[in-house]
Image (tube, rainbow, N blue to C red):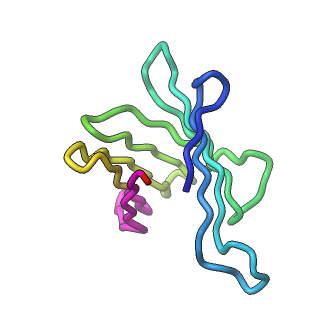
Amino acid sequence: MTFTWLLGRAYVQMHEVSRERAVDGKPAYEAVVLFGRDPATGDYACLWLDNTGSAAFPPEGTGRGAVAGDSVPFLFPYSANTSFHTTFVYDGARDAWEWHMDNDSAGVRRPFARVRLVRR
């Protein structure tokens, strides 16, 4: 996973490529994610593009979030009753990030994945 500043540090790009391989030898999962901050409100936006559902920038690939303490929780609404939560939590003692992903169906959140991100 790599992070790169873009366009004069206006955006951050995250590029994730899974180590797991599909039958054809390509990565089982790959994503390019853009993060930006609204200077007027301080809120963050996220555009998530991945190989699980290619489309012309689908609305469910756009999340919004605001800083809450040491975390930035993004909400990706899929429908009136379903959404996906992606929260980045900073651990200052370890200078690392945790990435929490949860499915939400009718207000019931279920953990999807937990990942620790550390600098190399």
Side of 57 where 36 appears, left or right: left
Side of 52 where 90 appears, left or right: left
Q: Is residue 35 above or below residue 8?
A: below
Q: Is residue 27 above or below residue 89?
A: below
Residue in the picture at 74% in, 45% down: 57
Side of 112 where 54 appears, left or right: right
Q: Is residue 81 above or below residue 6?
A: below
Residue in the picture at 41% in, 61% down: 102
Hey, which quadrant is residue 43 in on the image? top left
The answer to whether residue 105 shows anywhere in this view is no
Give the residue at the far left of this rendering: 93
Give the residue at the far bottom of this rendering: 23
The answer to whether residue 115 shows anywhere in this view is yes
Hey, which quadrant is residue 25 in on the image? bottom right
Q: How many dots with numbers?
A: 0
Instruction: Provide residue 18's location: percent of width, then percent of height.
Output: 59, 69
Q: Nearer the viewer, residue 87 or 110?
A: 87
Give the residue at the far top of this rendering: 40
Instruction: Provide residue 79's location: percent of width, then percent of height.
Output: 56, 53
The reply to whether the magenta stretch includes residue 118 is: yes
Instruction: Provide residue 1's location: percent of width, then percent of height.
Output: 55, 56
Q: Quadrant of the C terminus?
A: bottom left
Residue in the picture at 42% in, 59% down: 101
Residue in the picture at 39% in, 32% down: 66
Q: Nearer the viewer, residue 42 or 90?
A: 90
Main SS, magenta region, reads: strand
The reply to whether the magenta stretch includes residue 12 is: no
Instruction: Provide residue 56's location: percent of width, then percent of height.
Output: 80, 47
User: Magenta residues?
Assistant: 99-119
Q: Nearer the viewer, residue 88 or 58?
A: 88
